[in-house]
Image (tube, coloured by chain):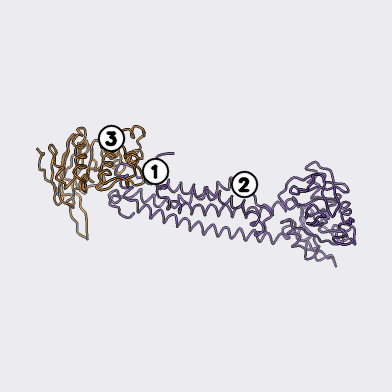
Amino acid sequence: MGIIGKTALKNLKRRSVRTLCMVFFAFMLSACLFCCSVLTDSMESSLQNTTDRLGADIIVVPEEYEGEMADSLFMGELCSFDFDKKWADTISQLEGVDQCTPQLYMASLAADCCSAATQMIVFDPQTDFIVTPWLEEEGLPLPGEGEMYIGALINPPEPDSIKFFGENYSVIGRLERTNTSYDTCVFMTADTAEQIRSSQGWADAFGEPEQSAHDLVSSLMIRVEEGSDAKAIARAINYSIEGAPVKAYTTNGIFSGVLRSVESMDGYTRVLMGVLLVLVVVALASVFTITINERTVEFGILSSLGVGAGRLSGIVLAEGLVIGLLGGFLGAVGAFAGLELFSTPIKVMLSIPRLDTSWQYLLPLAGTCIGLSVAVSLLSSLYSAWKVGRSRLDGLLKGEEL
Amino acid sequence: MVKTEGLTKNYTRQGKTFQAVDHVDLQVEKGEVLVLTGPSGCGKSTLFHLISGIIQPDEGQVYFDGQKISSLSAAKRTALRRQHISYILQGDSLLYNFTVLENICLPHLLSGWKDKKELETRGMSLLEEFRMADLAGNYPAELSGGERRRAAIVRAFVHGPQLVVADEPTSDLDEENTGIILDYFMRQKEKAILISTHDLSCLRTGVSHYAMAKGRIEKKGIID
């Protein structure tokens, strides 16, 4: 560290209360940017991951269940609703529909009968374009009767079996982490679902099932033909099939509530950061201006002994740099610690399925926060540095206001 | 070594212009100690500011080793003060955030002095000469007025300037401290030293005495 840096550090150290106040401003800026970025980016990436993983253009769900469906897909909340499979056959015949696959959702219970309260997703290997390619990607076979795959975040007491409604089922593999709600689901075919629904435990919990799992559908995932308009096809499903107790949504449409939340959170963040930026610049610039006016004689003494104007300005800028660096670093570290400590209440309160805390994401973000704090602190000290550099030496020695 | 010709500086106060320094001609040679006496406000500090290039004259010239200081740019005048001319400010002029030794070395290090160790060795040796070596690590607030003044003088001499300009170096000091400082000044045979004061104890044998009043200077002669 050069002599200018050491001088700046010594000055800051000797005026510790003033320094702490200035560092606090930079800390606030950095911590706010860090927190807001993690929250909005986590929400955006969760939404992006979910829509990417779905790979469907249209989702058809029973009427008035679109909220539950969106919460299940985005937040991993348990859901259990269904409609008759005959409607799936009708919809799959519509013009513009390229692929159409049904999924059935069943929820287990947080009781002794089950290993955990888990979302069970039943897929159809014949038509599926969501789970099957995933299994193929990982070189895994399709699950047979009584077999299932578990999501990356499911941890049954025994690694190769999981209990639902009093019966144990074979776990034949754990899927790679996707950072979506699928990580907390189990996947099976209709044969296994039928076994579960036929068990005594199921009957005790829900009564005897009236329909077979093969005849029930919770949602239809649709891919439209290339060049077709997903919105138009969704409209066709909604208005041209008479008596259908279902409603079709484009993927973005079903997440419109989440999208609105992301957009409003992004908007609030920008406003907050803008206001904070102005406040911090004004506050730091005021403190710097007051401080250099208290230090005119000090600068005069140095100048009378041959310290050039550039170096005097350099001392002020170096103090700004140190304050920005320190505040920025502490802000990023403090915000990270806060997010780690309070991640669960934050996720619940803001309905964010997960917070992105990977180093690949956090390190560049911390760098940006520190960079912003340094830039703001330097900007705030710039006027004072300029004033010190251009002041008359006799004026400085007399302690005249800069 | 230092020569002024018709040196004049005007100031305006409450709309009235007055001459703080009025056509001053002065010459100081190496090894000479010049003592300038005069009442407060007679222009002593302004004259010294002009000689050390802190301010620019309205008329006249200042020469240092034949070089016209008053024609130099601000940066070159700063460089001259850095290397050859040391200015000891009136009153308390130590930096309160720094220790005595840091106060002595820091301005010169900031000015581009490369060898910190050498500077510190010189500083410590001068502090010993001023009987202050044990105070090197103390902060100015922990020193007496005389000790602070002596530390400022060490700072002015540590980098080996040719000309030292001291504005009221003994004001408010007791006899002992005044004696220590003046003894040191008198021993500097390789430098020219200018002292402004209204302390008549500065008029020691061998010093050139000038008196100043209302901006004008009058040579009183060499003290026997």
Q: Which x, y percent locates residue B28?
A: 17, 38
Classify residue A15 as left or right of residue B207: right
Q: Secondary structure at mark 1?
A: helix
Classify residue B110 as left or right of residue A92: left
Q: Which x, y percent locates residue B146?
A: 25, 44
Residue on which disc 2 sits: A361
Q: Nearer the viewer, mark 2 or mark 3?
A: 3
Specify the quadrant that holds the C terminus of chain A: bottom left
Q: Which x, y percent locates residue A9?
A: 42, 44
The disc, 1 or 2, on the residue closer to the chain's N-terminal end is 1
Discs 1 and 2 lie in a common subunit? yes
Reply above or below: A109 against B1: below
Few, some or many residues within 10 Å of mark 2 (<14, 14–19, 20+): few
Which residue is painted at 34% across and 49% down in the image? A390
Q: Chain of mark 3?
A: B
Few, some or many residues within 10 Å of mark 1 (<14, 14–19, 20+): many
Discs 2 and 3 lie in a common subunit? no
- Tell me, for residue B121, which label it has, or none: none
Specify the quadrant that holds the N terminus of chain A: top left
Residue type highlighted by circle 2: Tyr
Rendered colour, chain A: purple
Reply above or below: B160 against B201: above
Rendered colour, chain B: orange
Residue type highlighted by circle 3: Glu
Q: Secondary structure at mark 2?
A: helix
Q: Chain of mark 1?
A: A
